[in-house]
Image: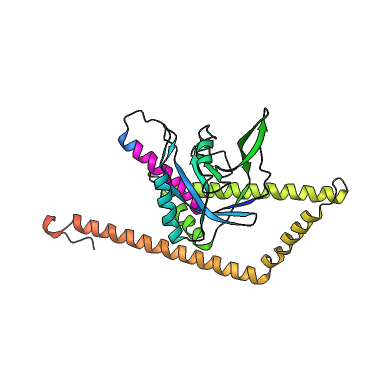
Amino acid sequence: MSSSSGLTFKLHPLVIVNISDHYTRIKAQQSGSAPRPLPPAPRVYGCVLGVQTGRTVEIFNSFELHYDATKNVLDRAFLESKQEQYKKVFPKYDVLGWYSTGSDIQDSDMLIHKALTDINESPVYLLLNPTINHAQKDLPISIFESELHVIEGVPSLIFVNASYTIETVEAERISVDHVAHIKPSDGSSAATQLAAHLTGMHSAIKMLNSRIRVLHHHLVSIQKGEVPYEHSLLRQVSSLVRRLPAIDSSRFQDDFVMEYNDTLLMTYLATITKCSSTMNELVDKFNTAYDKQNRRPGHSTFI
């Protein structure tokens, strides 16, 4: 069920990184201390911080919570302490809701949700699915709001799905790019990383091509009169098309060719330098192997 509140949610990458780090740490700690076979990783819990301006809710940061899943008890003292600490550093941030990990909503989630209503009367619930699904294209994150519905004559709070967009600032883009280029710990080679990168690029270009085809087919249908005019869509298409001449200018071509040639030259120089270094090391190894002390008289060094 979709939300009907009309709120616009903007999620920053730092929140996703924090939740992933929280889950990975707990899973690693459990893997290091637990016997084989490993039990399933426990769910992690925390609060999300941000700012609500009118109908726009922007989630900037998060912190962890202590929650005993066996007794369904939330550590209120720890929550209030963390909230006070973050309020000193980020005075504009408020507790907007909470987060957890899992493939789906659990029955106990509503208990935690209601426990936070004294801090925020309408908290949001962010759920991250840590299960890896290579076929999934969207982020494994869902945002839920709580709404009061009458079910079988009884008013009940239920979770409803809310749409969101990813919002980034320059510092976050740099951080995410740095994390994306960190070498994996499974010993993957540079060639494997390059193949994964090129595969991602190919998938992105393929998706872009399919969307352009859909858009082109829709415009052709409008031109033939098969589909009614959508002025808002046509304005967006017109705005997109206006950007194309700036990319197809002669100045852009000259700058592109110059930068492309510079890149090829730097690659060529780097290859020559690497070959020279390898040859140097090879010569040193020969000289070490045929050292004067280990040679027979009458032989000279390799170089």
Asked if residue 222 lies left or right of residue 85, the reply is right
Is residue 215 shown to the viewer in this render? yes
Residue ID at (64%, 57%): 54
Specify the segment rendered in magenta. Answer: 14-30
Q: In the displayed orientation, state which residue is furthest to the right.
A: 225
Q: How many marks?
A: 0
Image x and y of residue 109, in percent: 52, 36
28 or 268: nearer the viewer: 28
Image x and y of residue 293, in percent: 11, 58
212 or 115: nearer the viewer: 115
Is residue 192 shown to the viewer in this render? no
Q: Which quadrant of the figure contains the C terminus?
A: bottom left
52 or 246: nearer the viewer: 52
Residue ID at (26%, 59%): 283
Q: What kind of secondary structure does the magenta stretch mostly adopt?
A: helix
Q: Is residue 152 above or below residue 11?
A: above
Q: Is residue 61 above or below residue 20?
A: below
Residue ID at (42%, 63%): 270
* Residue 29 sits inside the magenta stretch: yes
- Give the quarter of the image for residue 249: bottom right
Image x and y of residue 274, in percent: 37, 60
Image x and y of residue 198, in percent: 53, 49
